Image (cartoon, rainbow, N blue to C red):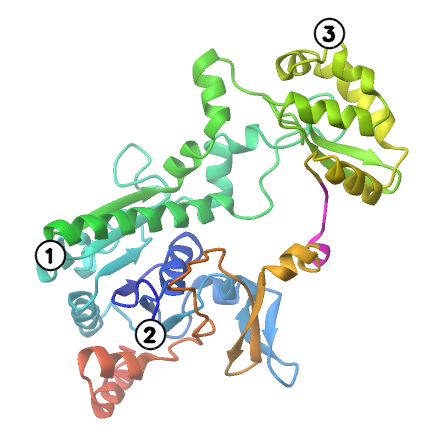
C-alpha cells in the first residue's frame, strides 16, 4: 500500500503544473481521478508529435507530453458545463480529500465548483488552485504559461550567453521548469494542509501561482540582487558565486567542472599540470577566483583542450574533484548510474503493450512508489469510478452518456 493510499484526489487540472502534482500524489498511492472534457480531454493529449505507437506501429493519439504527467490516475469524462455534470463533480468532491484545479481565477464559480461551493459540501476538502499569477493582484485574471513566466519572473535574464559572446541573449530553460516546480510546491502545500487537517479536521484553500514559484526559486540569484541592488547578469554556464564552476572544452568535446572549495581547486590544478595556480595570489581562495574570473578561466580553457572528456572525468574523479560529461538524453539513459537507479521504467498499456516512463525520484523504504497504471486513455475509467465511488449502475451511466454528460 502506498503512503497516501487512504486519500482520494479529484484532479480537474490539465497541461503540466496541476497534473504533475496529481501524478506525485498518485505515485505515492493516492486514488487520483482525472476529470476531463468528453471528446478532447487534457490539452496535452494532442500536443505532438511524438505520439505513442500501438502494437501495430500505428499512432495511438496519446502524445508523449501527456504521458509524462498522468500515470497512476483514473480518467473520467464529465461535461461540467451541464447541470448533471456539475452534480457528478459535486458528489465526487464530497467523497474526496483533495481537489486540484488550474482554471482562470473565478472560472469555476459559474459551475459551482469553486472552493467556497465545494467547501459547503465537504468542509474537510483541501482545494488547490494553480494559476499563473495567483488569486490576488493586478495580474490575477491573466492567463499564465511557463515560457511567459520564465521571462516575466526573471529566470531568462539569468539564462543564456553573456553579452559580447556569440549567441548572446536570454534563453528559456529547455523544459517547462516553472510548471514542474509549481507542481512540486503544490504537492508540498497539499501535504501541509493535510497535516493541518489531521490535527483540526478542517480543510483549506491552497493558492499557488507560477510567478510566485518562479521568483521563489531564483534562490541565491534573488539574494544576490536583494543584498546588493545589482541585477545579476547572464554568465552562460558559469556560476555567479563560485569559480571555476562551468563548462570547459576538451580534446573531443566539453565537460563540466564544479570546484566547490579551495582544496578541490588545488587538486584540480595538480591534475591539470598547473599546481602553481593554487598558490597564485589571484586564485588562492574562491573569493579571489571570482574577482579574477577573467584571468583564470582562459588559463583553464588552454589546459583542458589537451585531454579528452573521458580522461578529465576519470582523472578528476580519482582526485576527488567533482566533474562530469554533458550528455544528451540517449547518453544519459545509458549512463551506468541512471541504469543502476532504474530511472526508466515500463508500464503495461492497453494499446501499446507497454509505455515507457521516467521513474519517480522518491525512494521510501516502507511505502515505495508503485507503477500501478499507465497514463489512462480518455475516459477509460468513467464507468468504473462512477460505479465504485458514486454507486451509479450501468444503465445510469449509459443514460448520462446519451445525454452528452459523459
Number of the label disc, if any, that sits on residue 281: 3
Q: Is tag 2's residue or tag 1's residue first in the polypeptide sequence?
A: 2
Number of the label disc, if any, that sits on residue 123: 1
Q: Is tag 3's residue or tag 2's residue first in the polypeptide sequence?
A: 2
- Res. 145 in view: no
The reply, left or right, for residue 282 in relation to residue 7 is right
Q: CA distance from mark 3 to mark 2?
A: 68 Å
Q: Residue at x 9, y 58 (%)?
A: 120
Tags 3 and 2 touching, CB below 8 Å: no
Quarter of the image with the C terminus in it: bottom left
Furthest residue to the top?
Answer: 281
Where in the figure is residue 262, as x and y percent of width and height? 66, 21
Number of the label disc, if any, that sits on residue 387: none
Where in the figure is residue 305, as x and y percent of width and height? 87, 33
The reply, left or right, for residue 119 in relation to residue 169 is left
Q: What segment carries the magenta color?
A: 324-331
Furthest residue to the left?
Answer: 120
Q: CA distance from mark 2 to mark 1?
A: 25 Å
Q: Which residue is mark 2?
A: 77
Q: Residue 192, relative to residue 155: is it above or below?
A: below
Q: CA distance from mark 1 to mark 3?
A: 65 Å
Q: Nearer the viewer, residue 39 or 96?
A: 96
Image label count: 3
Q: Is tag 1's residue or tag 3's residue first in the polypeptide sequence?
A: 1
Of badges 2 and 1, nearer the viewer stands 1
Q: Nearer the viewer, residue 205 or 347?
A: 347
Q: Residue 204, relative to residue 27: is it above or below?
A: above
The reply, left or right, for residue 102 in relation to residue 110 is right
Amino acid at each position: 500500500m502506498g503512503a497516501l493510499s487512504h486519500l482520494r484526489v479529484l484532479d480537474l487540472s490539465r497541461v503540466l503544473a496541476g497534473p504533475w502534482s496529481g501524478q506525485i500524489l498518485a505515485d505515492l498511492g493516492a486514488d487520483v481521478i482525472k476529470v476531463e472534457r468528453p471528446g478532447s480531454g487534457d490539452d496535452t493529449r494532442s500536443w505532438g508529435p511524438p505520439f505513442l505507437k500501438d502494437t501495430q506501429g500505428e499512432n495511438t493519439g496519446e502524445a508523449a507530453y501527456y504521458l509524462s504527467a498522468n500515470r497512476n490516475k483514473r480518467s473520467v469524462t464529465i461535461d461540467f458545463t451541464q447541470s448533471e455534470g456539475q452534480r457528478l463533480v459535486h458528489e465526487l468532491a464530497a467523497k474526496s480529500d483533495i481537489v486540484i484545479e488550474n482554471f482562470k481565477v473565478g472560472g469555476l464559480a459559474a459551475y459551482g465548483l469553486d472552493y467556497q461551493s465545494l467547501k459547503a459540501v465537504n468542509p474537510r476538502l483541501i482545494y488547490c488552485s494553480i494559476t499563473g499569477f495567483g488569486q490576488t493582484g493586478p495580474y490575477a485574471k491573466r492567463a499564465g504559461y511557463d515560457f511567459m513566466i520564465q521571462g516575466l519572473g526573471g529566470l531568462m535574464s539569468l539564462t543564456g550567453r553573456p553579452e559580447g559572446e556569440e549567441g548572446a541573449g536570454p534563453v528559456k530553460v529547455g523544459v517547462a521548469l516553472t510548471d514542474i516546480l509549481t507542481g512540486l510546491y503544490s504537492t508540498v502545500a497539499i501535504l501541509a494542509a493535510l497535516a493541518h487537517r489531521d490535527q483540526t479536521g478542517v480543510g483549506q484553500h491552497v493558492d499557488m501561482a507560477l510567478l510566485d514559484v518562479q521568483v521563489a526559486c531564483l534562490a541565491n540569484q534573488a539574494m544576490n540582487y536583494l543584498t546588493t541592488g545589482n541585477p545579476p547578469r547572464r554568465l552562460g554556464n558559469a556560476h555567479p558565486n563560485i569559480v571555476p564552476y562551468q563548462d570547459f572544452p576538451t580534446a573531443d568535446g566539453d565537460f563540466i567542472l564544479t570546484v566547490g572549495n579551495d582544496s578541490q581547486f588545488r587538486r584540480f590544478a595538480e591534475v591539470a599540470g598547473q599546481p602553481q595556480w593554487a598558490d597564485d595570489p589571484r586564485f588562492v581562495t574562491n573569493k579571489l577566483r571570482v574577482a579574477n574570473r577573467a584571468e583564470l578561466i582562459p588559463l583553464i580553457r588552454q589546459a583542458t583542450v589537451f585531454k579528452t572528456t573521458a580522461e578529465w572525468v576519470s582523472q578528476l574523479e580519482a582526485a576527488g574533484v567533482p566533474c562530469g560529461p554533458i550528455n544528451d538524453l540517449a547518453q544519459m539513459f545509458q549512463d551506468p548510474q541512471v541504469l543502476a537507479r532504474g530511472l526508466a521504467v515500463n508500464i503495461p498499456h492497453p494499446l501499446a503493450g507497454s509505455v515507457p516512463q521516467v521513474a519517480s525520484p522518491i525512494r521510501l523504504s516502507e511505502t515505495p512508489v508503485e507503477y500501478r497504471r499507465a497514463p489512462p486513455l480518455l475516459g477509460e475509467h468513467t464507468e468504473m469510478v462512477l460505479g465504485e465511488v458514486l454507486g451509479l449502475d450501468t444503465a445510469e451511466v449509459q443514460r448520462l452518456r446519451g445525454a452528452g454528460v459523459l
